[in-house]
Image (tube, rainbow, N blue to C red):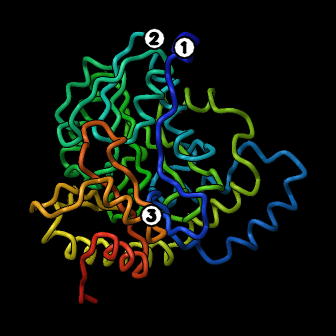
Amino acid sequence: MDPERLRRVGRVPHGGESDPAVLDLSANTNPKTPPGVEDVYETALAEATRYPDDGYADFRAAAAAFVGCDPSQVVPTPGGLAAIRLTIETAVGPGDRVAVPAPSFGEYAREVRLQGAEPVFVPHDELCDVDPAGVALVVCCTPNNPTGDCPAPERLAALADRCADAGTTLLADEAFLGYTARDSLAGRDGVVVARSLTKLFGLPGLRAGYAVATGERLAALRTARRTWNLGTPAAAVGAHCLRQRAFVSETREIVGRERERLRNALEPTYSVHPSEAPFVLVDCGGRDADCHDVDSVLGRARERDVSLRDARTFRGLDTHVRVAVKDRTATDRTLEVFDVRTDGP
């Protein structure tokens, strides 16, 4: 990390609402957790009086089965963002250039700058066309946050191949990919995948995630990873969650249904970006002159004890909010905020 940059790089805004009385649709987390989590946590907590086994064999096996790679390629981390930082700090140095999608997760550019490198912002829907020869790292987010769309698999695969040929690392942030049936890039040469248990399993406070890599990149991540970087309860609960396939299927079904319901109700008035993620990006500029601006929508939400994400904090967005997709109750309350109704199922 570049000490000089530390004096100049600030924090970036995120969603998240601390008041339990407020319906938090600013953070894209599952309102449910898998069955059995409490029992697993309680048992693991009793074992936390000793250091965890730094091999994390059970966690790595569960993660590998979930994304379809070899357990030896899994590097445990305390959350997906930790996997992103670990990748960036082992792949780039001062003066390097890094291709970063925009609009997208603000931590990418911040982490790049903390290493003394420079983010090169690329429109998120053009990232697969970038020339990796001119950069040390390419970052992609699938589905992209905050837009929710994914590149076509063949375009993403072609980018991965070009990065491998150029010796450039491709960092694939798949924090939301578990909400889709798309294949992971885990185990592909030249690619580091970052995964999180935060969103899909509704456990943002657990701080459990992992990276997946091969070859020299895997060796670098293993060496740089802090010893005991995943607590005993996080490792045990994480492994348990990653094996709950029925829970994952049910979550995908609910989110897909509610996302479609929300989109169908909003689109006659508002412009809604296509999404495969547990959120939708809504343009408050709308399709007619009677739509609310961002401040009006956020104000209406607060009056109804609902928290939405002000998407103006993302690069290049001036008239948007991001809305998390959760369950039917959340959808109903969202539609009240936007003053629209639906009679759909």
The answer to whether residue 203 is left or right of residue 106 is right
Tag 2's secondary structure?
A: loop
Identify the residue position indicated by label 1 in the image: 2
Residue at image position (17%, 55%) is 285
Instruction: Give the class, few, some or many, for how many residues have Cα within 10 Å of label 1's Cα (few <14, many ≥20).
Output: few
Can you say which quadrant of the picture contains the C terminus? bottom left
- Classify residue 304 by image quadrant: bottom left
Instruction: Give the class, few, some or many, for how many residues have Cα within 10 Å of label 3's Cα (few <14, many ≥20).
Output: some
Sequence-first tag of 3 and 1: 1
Q: Nearer the viewer, mark 2 or mark 3?
A: 3
Sequence-first tag of 2 and 3: 2
Identify the residue position indicated by label 2 in the image: 94
The answer to whether residue 343 is left or right of residue 305 is left
Above or below — where is 226 with respect to 265? above
Front position in the image: 53 or 37? 37
Tag 3's secondary structure?
A: helix
Residue at image position (74%, 69%) is 40
Tell me the distance, in whole angstroms, between the alpha carbons under discs 3 and 1: 40 Å
Above or below — where is 337 with respect to 287? below
Above or below — where is 279 with respect to 338? above
Q: Which amino acid type is shown beneath numbered disc 3?
A: Arg
